[in-house]
Image (cartoon, rainbow, N blue to C red):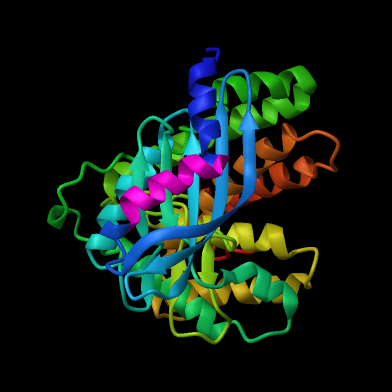
Amino acid sequence: MKLSETTKQKIAQLIAKDFVCHIFNERLKKYYSDFKEVKSIETKPFKKHLGLTSAVFVVEYQIKYLSSQGALKDLDIFVSAHSDGSRKGAYEKTKTLYEHGFGQGKYRVTKPLFFLDEQQAFFYVSSPGRSFFSFFLENTQADLTKAMELMAGWLKQLHNFDTKIANFKWPIFNILDMVPTPQKFVKDFYNSSDKLGQHMDNLVKDLQALDLEYRQKNKETLVYGDFHPENVIMRGLDVQDIEMIDFTDIALGDPMMDIGAFIQQFDFMGHNFISRPEIDRHKQSFVEIYFGQKFEEIDIEYINRINLYQSWTAMRTAVFLFYMKNVFNPIDDLLLDSIKYLDMAKNSQRAINIS
C-alpha cells in the first residue's frame, strides 16, 4: 500500500529542530526533575528512509539543557520510528521490562521515554558504551569470559521473567513471521535458481515442522528474538553491567532460540576476523556459561533446539543478503550451514559447530 504524503511529512518532522525542541520542552520534565528548557540540540540521522510504501527513521539528539539550578547539562536521546507501527510495541515492551527488574542493576534495558502516535516514534535514552562486537573487533585475542557471563546472565534473567507480574499481552514468537514472508522469498529464490529455490523450500518446511514439535512439548518463556553481538551495549569487555537495545522482537517462545541466534550470529560476524577453532571455542564457552555445565553434560534436547535455531538464523541471514544489491552475498555457504545445523538437530548430534 502506498504511503500517504501526510504520514511521510509527520515522520520527517523528527529531524526538524523546532519540532523536536518543542516536544522535549514539553515532555522531559517528567523524566528529569531538574529540566528547565532545551538550550541547543544537534540531530544525527542514522536512518532516513521515506519510500513509496514505508518510512523508517532513526535519529540521535545531542541535547544541552538548562537545569533549574542554572547549569548546562547534556542528554543523549534516540528516536526510532517506522510507518508500520512496530515501534509502539517496542516502546511498550521496553517500558514493561524497565519497570519490572531491568531498569537498574547489571542487567538492564535501554531507558524508554515516550511514544508519539502521529510520528509512530519511540524516544529512548542512549545506552552508555558501544556494542560488544565493536570491542571484540578491537582486540580479537581479548578474554571474553566476563562479557559472555554478563550476556548469558542477561538472557537467563529474561528467560526467567515472570510474565504474570506485568499487565501486558506478550506476542507469540513464530519463526515464519519474517519480512519478507516465506511465501515471497521462496518464490524469489526459485526465480533466481531452481536449485536454490528447492533448498529454501525444503528448509522452510523442515524448520517449521521441527520448531512446532518442540513448541508443543516445551514451556515458552520471554525471548529476545534477535539476540546478536551488536545489540549488546557495554563500556568495555571487563565491565560489571550491560544494556540491551532494540526490543521489537521480544515475545513468548523457546529460550534456546536466543542462544542459537547469538552463537550463529557471532560465528557469521566473526569468521572473517578470527580462526575457526577460536570461534568454535567462544561459542561453546557461551553455551556452557548459560547452562552452568560442561558441554558434555547438557541435555541433548537443548543442543538440538540450539541447532534448530542456528539453522533458522543462518537461513534468515541468507534471505537478508539475497535481497542486498551490489555486495558479495555468500548465501550458498549460509544455506549449506543452515542445512547442516538442521541435520545435527534431527540426528541428536552433540555439537554446535560445523566441522
Question: Image point 58% across, 65% down: which residue?
Answer: 351
Range of residues picked out in magenta: 15-28
Q: Is residue 23 magenta?
A: yes
Query: In the image, residue 131 lies at what x, y percent?
Result: 59, 67
Q: Nearer the viewer, residue 20 or 205?
A: 20
Query: In the image, residue 109 lies at what x, y percent?
Result: 38, 63
Question: Image point 32% across, 63% down: which residue?
Answer: 158
Q: Nearer the viewer, residue 245 or 50?
A: 50
Q: Nearer the viewer, residue 229 or 310?
A: 229
Q: Main secondary structure of the magenta part?
A: helix
Q: Is residue 58 magenta?
A: no
In this rendering, position of residue 196 left or right of residue 300: right
Q: Picture quarter containing residue 31?
A: bottom left
Residue sitting farthest toward the top: 1
Question: Image point 31% across, 69% down: which residue?
Answer: 34
Query: In the image, residue 4 lies at what x, y percent?
Result: 52, 15
Question: Image point 81% across, 33% down: which residue?
Answer: 325
Residue 213 drawn above or below residue 9: below
**Number of numbered markers:** 0
Quadrant, the C terminus: bottom right
Query: In the image, residue 217 lies at what x, y percent?
Result: 28, 47
Residue 179 can be seen in this image: no
In this rendering, position of residue 333 left or right of residue 78: right
